[in-house]
Amino acid sequence: MRALKCWRIPAILTILQQTWILAMEIPPDGEELQPPMIFKESPQDYIVDPVDPIIVECEATGNPPPVFTWTRNGVYLNVARDPQVSMRWRSGTLEIFFWGRPNDYEGVYQCTATNEFGSALSSYINLRVSKARTWLKEYLEPVSVVVGLPLILPCNPPVGPPKPSTYWLNSTMALIRQDRRVSKAENGDLYFSSIVAEDALTNYVCVARFPFTNTIQQKPPLILFVKCQVLCQICVLFYVYVARMAAHTAPRFLKPKGTASTTIAMLGEELILECFAAGVPTPFIKWTKDWEEMSMTGKKLENFNKTLRIKNVSMDDGGDYICTASNRMGSLDHVITVRVKSVPFWVEKPESLVLSRDDSGSIVCRGKKHPGRQVSGDTLTFRAVVPDSAAVFQCNASNQYGYIMANAFLAVMGKISNQRVYRSKGGLGTLEGSRHRILPNGTLEIRNTKLQDQGSYVCVASNVIGRDEKEVQLEVKEPIKIVRAPHNTVVIRGSLARFDCKIKFDSTLDVTVTWLKDKKFLILGRRMTKDEDSLSIADVYRRDEGVYTCRVKSELEEVTAPAKLTVMDRPDPPSDLEISDPSERSVRLTWVPGLSNHSPIKEYLVQYTEDLLADYWLLPSGWKNLSSYPGSLNSVILQLTPFVEYRFRVITVNGIGPSKPSWPSEYYQTGGAVPDAIPRNIQGMGSGVFRNNMEISWEPLEYREWNGPKLGYMVWWRRRDSREEWKNYTTYWWCSYIIYDTDTFTPYEIKVQAVNFFGYGPESTIVLGYSGEDRPVAAPSDLSVSDIESSTLTVHWEPVSRLWLVSQVYYWRENSRLPWHTVSRRIKTKSFKANGPRLSGTLTGLVPYSNYRMYIVVANNRYEGPPSNTIEFQTPEGVPSIPRSFRIMHRHYDTIYLDWEEPAEPNGILTGYILKYQTLNVTLGDRIQVEYITPNITYFSLRRFDRYTRYKFSLAAQTEVGAGEAFTEESPHFTTEGKVSSFTFIWSLFLDIVTQGWFIGLMCAVALLVLIMLIVFFIKRSRGGKYPVYQHEPGPVTADIHESSQVTTDRHESSLDTVDYHESGQITVDSPESTKVTASIAESSQVSADLPEPRHITAYLPEPSQITVVLHESSHS
C-alpha cells in the first residue's frame, strides 16, 4: 500500500455537524517519484489555418521530468535538424514556423513522454492544413425542363478540409429564396419539387465559403430553360397561371431514393436526416418515429420540415424514422432505419497504482462492449512487485469506428512492515465504536458527526524502522440550512415575481447570500431588489426569465437552492409566411409559429388586404379578418375571390392576448374566372314621361364579385304569353337598359346575367316587368263603409277593369260631434291593392265621436284617376284620452291639492272622472280609495294623516263607453327638507294669494294709478322746458348785474364770459366753459353758469327775484 508519513506540524480541520461522513486523510511529506503522464494533447482530427504557426500540443507530468519525442507517419521526427520546427522548453508542444508549403507538414503525429520509470504515448493526431480549393473550370450547358417536373441542380463544392458552406445566388448575386418547393440540401444541391415558368427568369450560381480562410469560391452560372405543357406565350405572359396549367402528380422521393434506407449514427455526434420529394402541388413533409408521433426533445425540424437534425445522438435515438410526403394527389412513405454506433468509451478508466515491495494489485481497463471492439482482457494484475516493476502502461480500446487510449503507471515503494495507523481524540487511547472506522489506507472515518467530536486527533504510524505521528485539530460547526427555499414561479409579464430564501446558520460563521441568474451573478437595481429573506422582481420582462439561484456561502460550505422563473406573455408573431397551391379561388398559407411564451396558443387569426383589379383601377383596402384557425395548425387553405391581388398576415392568440401581426406575405394574385354572382333587384317599368318604353334596371355587382376584367351585363327580354324569341343586349358601363316602341302597360319577362373577359355568369330568375303607364280614366264606384267602430271601419268599392291598379282612399275629419270641440281637417290617405272582384279594406286610426268624409281613386306608378263620389259617416262614442296638466300641490301641511284639465280628445260626452289613491306606506295597509268626480270639476283636495304620508294618485276620464287611459303620479316629499319646508309653505301661500281675483284687481288699479301719475309728470315737464345736461370740465361763472346793459364776469378775468341784462327783463349769458346757470335779481344781483362749450343762454325774469334759463342749440332746443 501507499506509504503514509505523519506530519509533525499541527493542522486544523473544521467540518459541519450533520449526518455526513468525515474522512480525515493525512497527505505524505515530500515529493514522490512518478512515471510520466500525458494530461494535454491536440485533438485527434486537427485542422489548422496555414496563415498561423502550427501548434501541436503535448503536455505531461512526471518525476523526474519526462523527455519528449515525436513521430510523424510512424517515423521519428528529428526536431533539432528542422529549422522550421521547435519544441517548447520543458514541454512536448511543437511549434512549426513554416516558410513555403505548409502541406509538407501534414501527417499523423504521436508524442512520447519518457523518464526512468517508463514512457507515456499520446493519441494519434491527424494534422491537416485548411485548403480553399477552387472549382475546375468548366462550361455548364443550359438545363431544359418541362413545367411541373422536378429538378436537381448539383453544386459539388471543392473538398476541404474543412467542409465549406454552400449558398445559391441569382443573376443579381442575391440569395435564391427558398421555400417548400425550392430548397437546398446539406451537400449543397438545389432541389426543385416542381418547376414553374418564373424559375427561368434568373441564372443559378453555387458559391462555397471556407471558414478558416473566409475564402469564397464561385461556380460558373447555370442557365435554366423552362418548357410549358401548353402554349409558350401563355407561360411567359401569364406565369401566375402556370401552377394551374401543370398536371397534378403524386409525390415521389428525390432524396433518399426508394421507400427504405439505412444510416449509421455515432453516439454523441450530430445526425442529419433529409427528405426531398417531388410532386404537384408541392408535397408536405411530416416525420414520425416507429410509426408514432415523434418527441422533439433534442431534435429540430429545418428547411421546411425537409431536414431532421439531432444535435447529440443518444442510444434512444435509434429506430425507424418515417418521412411522409403528401399532397392532394396522394401520399408516400420512406423509412430511414437509424442504427446508433459508438467509438469505445470508458466504463472504468485505468488509474495509476502505488504498491509497496512484494505487494500485489491490479489496473482495470474496462470499456463499453460494443460490437466489433477488440480488447484482450480488461484487467492487468501484479503480484510480488519489485522496484523494477515500475512502468507506464497504455490501455487501447478500439473498434471499426475509432479507438481510445489511456496511460496508467505502477509505482513501487520501499517495504514497510507491521504498519499500524491509529486515530485518537485528545491523544488518549484509540478510537473505537460504530461511528468511527479506520480505512485500509489509514484514513479515519467518523459517521454522523456531532459537536462532541470537536477536539484534537493524532495519527500514529509505525513499522520496524520507526514511528511517526501527526496531530489534527477538528472543529464542528452547524451546517447552513435553507428553511424556506425559492419555488418555481410562473407570472404574467409586467407583474411582480418573488423568490424566498430564508436561511439558518451557525452564528460563529460569516455567511453571505448572493443571487445568480443562469449561473451568473445577478445585478440588482431599481426593478430587482433583495431583502433579508427574498428577492423581488418588479415589472417582469421576458428577458427576466431563467433559473434564479440563492447561493449561501460560508468559509466551510456553499449551499444553493435554484428556482425557475417563467414569464407568460403574448405570443410572438408567426414568421416565414409562405404561399403555395395556387388556384382561382383558394391558396395554401403556411407559417412558422412564434413562441407561445408559456401560454398555449388558442388560435391563429389570418388577415388580408386586397387590391381589386377592376378595369385598370387599383382599389386598395385595409387589413381585414379572413378567418381564424385552431392553434394546432400552421398550414391552412384560404378561400379567396378570383382576380384579386392579396397579401396575408397572421396574428397568434393565446390566453394572455393577441400577438403583433406577422410580416405580410408576398403579393399573390388569384386567377380570373367567370362571374359567380347574379345581378340583384331586377326591375322593369316605364321610364320618363313616355308610355311606350320600358327601363330594365338592376343593382351592379360589387368589385369583388367581378372575378375578371371587362365586366358587363347581358339583358334578356320578351313579351309574356307570346311566342317571341328572347332578345338580348350587352352593356358594359350602365346598370339599366331602355326598350322602346312598346305597348302601354304590357308585361314582359326579364332576366339579366353578368359577363366578363372569361365568360358568362349564371342567369337570374325571370322577373316580370311592365312598360310605361298612362293616366287612369275610370273611377271606382259604389263606395261604402261598414262595421263602423269608434276607431276602425271597413271600406267597400267596385273596382275598375284593370286589376293591377292601386286603390287610394282619401278621408278627413270634418268636425267633432261635440259642437264646442275644434278639430284638424288634415286629409289622410291609405292604399289598397286589388285582391278580388269587389274590393274592400280596413281603415284604422279614426277619432271617435266625429264626422268624416271620404272618396277613393285608382292610381298606377305615375298617375291618379278621377275621384269617386264623396261619402260621409260618423264614428261612435269611445273612451276619452288621458286628462291633461295633472298637478299635485302642497299648500298646507295637512292638505294635498290636485287639479287638472279635461282630455285633449273627449271622444264623446264626458260623464265624470275617476280618481283612485292609496298611501305609499306599506305598513299602513290602506286599501285603494275611489272618488267619482263630476265632469265640471277639475280639482280635488285631500287631508293627510300627517306630513310624512305620501300618496299614489290615478286619474281617468270616462264616457258612457267607459274609462279612458289613467294618469298616475305619486305625491312629492314635503317634510323631509328641514328649513326649506318653511319656504315651501310660504311659496305655496303666495301662489294661493296671487291667483285670487281680488288680488288681480288690486294690482290692475295700482298699475292704472302709476300710469296716470306718469302722464301728469310729463305734461308738467313739457310746460317748464327741458335741456340736456353735459358734464365737461365744469367751471363757475359769476357776473354782477347793474343797470348797465352788459356785465363782465370775474372768472379768471375772462372776456369771453358775458351777461347781458335788458330792460325787458331778459338776461343773456355767454360762456365757453359753464354748464350750470342760475340767476337771481337783487340790489347786488349775480348770475353763475356752468357750460361745457360756448353757448348762447337766454334767461327770462318772471319775478324780480328768480329767473328761468332756456338753452338753445343749433341741433335742438
Image: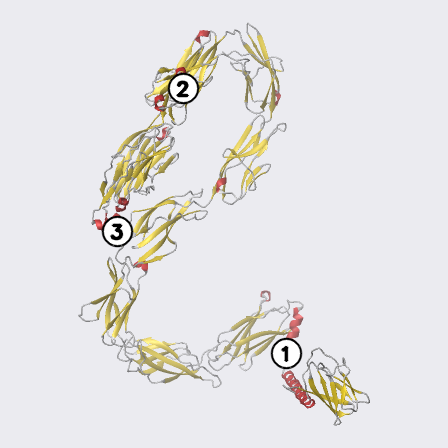
From this viewpoint, is residue 765 visible? no
**Residue 116: image x %, image y %?**
45, 10
N-terminal of the two: label 1 or label 2? 2
Residue at which label 2 appears: 85
Of 1069 and 141, nearer the camera is 1069
Label 3 crowd bin: few (<14), some (14–19), many (20+), radius 10 Å: few
The reply to whether discs 1 and 2 touch (Cβ–Cβ < 8 Å) is: no
Residue at which label 1 appears: 992
N-terminal of the two: label 2 or label 3? 2
Residue at which label 3 appears: 238
Of 934 and 323, nearer the camera is 323
Q: CA distance from mark 1 to mark 3?
A: 95 Å
From this viewpoint, is residue 268 visible? yes
Residue kind at label 1, given as amino acid type: Asp
The reply to whether discs 2 and 3 touch (Cβ–Cβ < 8 Å) is: no
Identify the element where label 3 is drawn.
loop
